[in-house]
Image (tube, rainbow, N blue to C red):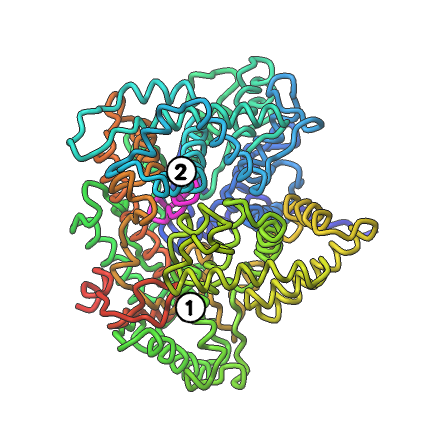
Amino acid sequence: MVTAAPVDREAALQEIRTGLRRGQQALADWQGGQLAVSAVPGSGKSTGMAAAAAIAIARHQLHLNRQLVLVTFTRSAAANLKAKVRGHLRQLGLAQTSFTVSTLHGLALTIASRNPELSNLNLETLTLVSPTQNNRILRACVEQWIVASPDLYHRLIEGRQFDGEETEQLRRQSVLRTEVLPSLAHTVIREAKSSGLMPTDLVTLAAQVSHDLPGDVEDYDVLTIAAGLYDRYQTLLSQRGWIDYDDMILGALRTLEDPDSRHFWQSRTFAVFEDEAQDSSPLQTRLLTLLAADPDDPTGEPNLVRVGDPNQAINSTFTPADPVFFNQFCNACRHQGDLVTMDQAGRSSGVIMAAANRMLTWVNQARVAGPETPFRDQAIAPVDPDDPQPGANPAPLGAGVEILSPPTTVDTVRLIAERVRDLYTEHPDTSFAILVREGRQGQFVGNLLRDPAQVGVDLPALGLTLYDVGEQDRQTRVPTDMLTLLRFIERPHSPDTLKGALRVLVDRQRIPTQDLNSLAQAPEQFLYPGPLDAPPDTEAARTARRYCTGLLRSRLELPPYSLFSFIGLTLAYNQSELATADKLAARVSQQIRQDDTLAAAIGALQDIVGSERFTAVETEDTDSLYTRPGQLTLITMHKAKGLDWDVVFLPFLHDKTIPGTLWVPPQGEFLGDFTLAEVARAQIRAHAHGHRGEIPDIMTAWEQAKHLKAAEEYRLLYVAMTRAKRLLWMSAAQQAPFTWSKPDALQSANPCPVLPVLRK
């Protein structure tokens, strides 16, 4: 029998450390206590964390009952981090049971489910609410609040410039019920709950808001309305046996409030290493800090290592994440000498890093986000000449950074196609990506690139693959679109189902963008106007009516199975989406064999949508799927975070997009020059940021919201720029669409303010 040679552990540990850069080595040298690691893009955060984890496991002889807990943001990131740690442990000859890797919510659920009597979360009786169910429960909250709070509701209806006219009152009611109040509820519940605030806390905050407003600004007492919606949301969740993601965190915290349970978890946890710490909410941070504390010295410093980049905090649009929280942690650690800046990055060539640094410095100095400072003052530095990690700071392609100003957006795509052709012909192993700010821009680019006659380049004929990430995502929308339109076909006289159908038609660009509330407030008059009814008076409204009546006729002429194909053709689905619709129709038809009715089809489809069976799931090879050599990937800037390509194209960089402005939808302007959701978000964040007793009034909160948006848009551009390894191509066409729902309607456009700075 052959036995494995014993491992020289000290030599192996030294080999792992030697393979790290300066900042990564500082992380690997951690001995205990708190440590903040602020890392620039491309610095190898996960590489450094995996090595530091393996070294800590070896140095402190961790085992199954005394583990290192690693926490990251997504399941795919957790899987990648786990694989790296395991590789190091095999090299060291150590057991694989000395650490755990999970998402933050996964960790919270593990803690909460072990002691359901403490967490009040019993997975045998509770269900995680799906996005579809969450939307329905928010609508129910709104309806209940309207009944319970007639005075506040009527104050919203009156808004400004209200003359009591019945048609206008019905329109405002529709806007409030289907748009304004659901948006306010969604934003407030997410922001408040993740900050540890309950409805009663919002009532207390509401009392701190100044109501000394100018005479032309209505005082709606936004936080009081928000508290009422939040309270009903909590009640409905409890009644239906549902929980949301924040309930997992709260359940884990309740578990750790018990002394015996807290001692159990803390004694099993040697330390907590957190990746992507800039994306954590205050509630999540509280959980990790408590878990990392010493069970025998709860007032001492926890063994907590937080790694992140506040300059890549780009998720506050979707989550309660805010870079201010991680910046506060970094500043506190710096005063104690426990801050590491991981500033060396090997991803990009020097000229690309210099452009990113120039942009960061200019944005902070120019105060383009008002009092907000969008970036932490840390520059990206090249690696040392003897860097141990291969392929660092690759040589640029061409000039490394190219900034163009084409005449139109079509010319922009044509130039991209030509540049890809030339580079691919010379360097066939190159990876390419086009990063866009929004999905409609991606659709525009994808449609042009698939039509060689328009761009003059046949990319597939060259052997280059176009991978449109947005197209894959749009396929997951097929079941929801089908359900929305079938509900309308079944109940065409419901204002809600009619508005839902119109929204789908607008999103699919079958009808022009318009005020849908005015169309949906009287469905019968809109769909089949009588002799005394005024027919639709605009071409856009007439187009919408034509599509809707066509859908209604299909119910009389087609069986439920065939409606799926008809709807797909009506929405101009592409080949992949039609195939998805056919697959969906086959599944629904199989489920309703005994009851082949429209109502049964809607019920079956509702079950499918509710269970999210068609939602795309991230896998461990997602990165390689997006970044293959010889492939042109079309993806949004948000989805590109964490990825990189040899060549990155950033088209349509106009000031209307980045930084853009907070937009008040025309149908909601009767409330004022602000949106209730953004006002409430800014008021809650003022409290969460530590501004005790200084909750801003409506107009001050709106100004703060605009500054927060501008800061995040510049951080998003920074993330997009730092995805490029060898060539960064940026452009702003001289003429661009006023709205991307009408990409052919061009007008003069100004570039993002950063572009002139980078040209110098």
Q: In this orientation, does residue 297 appear?
A: yes
Does the stretch in magenta take in 515?
A: no
Does the stretch in magenta take in 309?
A: yes
Kind of residue at disc 2: Gln
Q: Secondary structure at mark 2?
A: helix
Q: Position of residue 6 (x, y in %)?
A: 68, 46
Q: Position of residue 144 (x, y in %)?
A: 49, 27
Placement of 501 over or under 749, stated as above or below: above
Residues rendered magenta in the picture: 308-320
Q: Position of residue 703 (x, y in %)?
A: 22, 40
- Which quadrant of the structure image shows residue 679? top left
Please report the residue visible at 60 percent of the width from the left and 37 percent of the height from the top. Answer: 99
- Residue 482 horizontal side relative to residue 665, left or right: right
Residue closer to the observer: 155 or 275: 155
Q: Secondary structure at mark 1?
A: strand
For the C terminus, the image quarter is bottom left
Q: Position of residue 5 (x, y in %)?
A: 70, 50
Graded by Cα atoms within 10 Å as few (under 14), some (14 to 19) or many (20 or more), the crowding at tag 1 reads: many
Q: Which residue is mark 2?
A: 173
- Residue 173 horizontal side relative to residue 66, left or right: left
Report the number of numbered marks. 2
Kind of residue at disc 1: Ile
- Residue 640 horizontal side relative to residue 702, left or right: right
Q: Which residue is mark 1?
A: 434
Placement of 732 over or under 299, stated as above or below: below
- Which quadrant of the structure image shows residue 725? bottom left
Between circles 2 and 1, the one closer to the viewer is 2
Graded by Cα atoms within 10 Å as few (under 14), some (14 to 19) or many (20 or more), the crowding at tag 2 reads: some
Please report the residue visible at 71 percent of the width from the left and 27 percent of the height from the top. Answer: 124
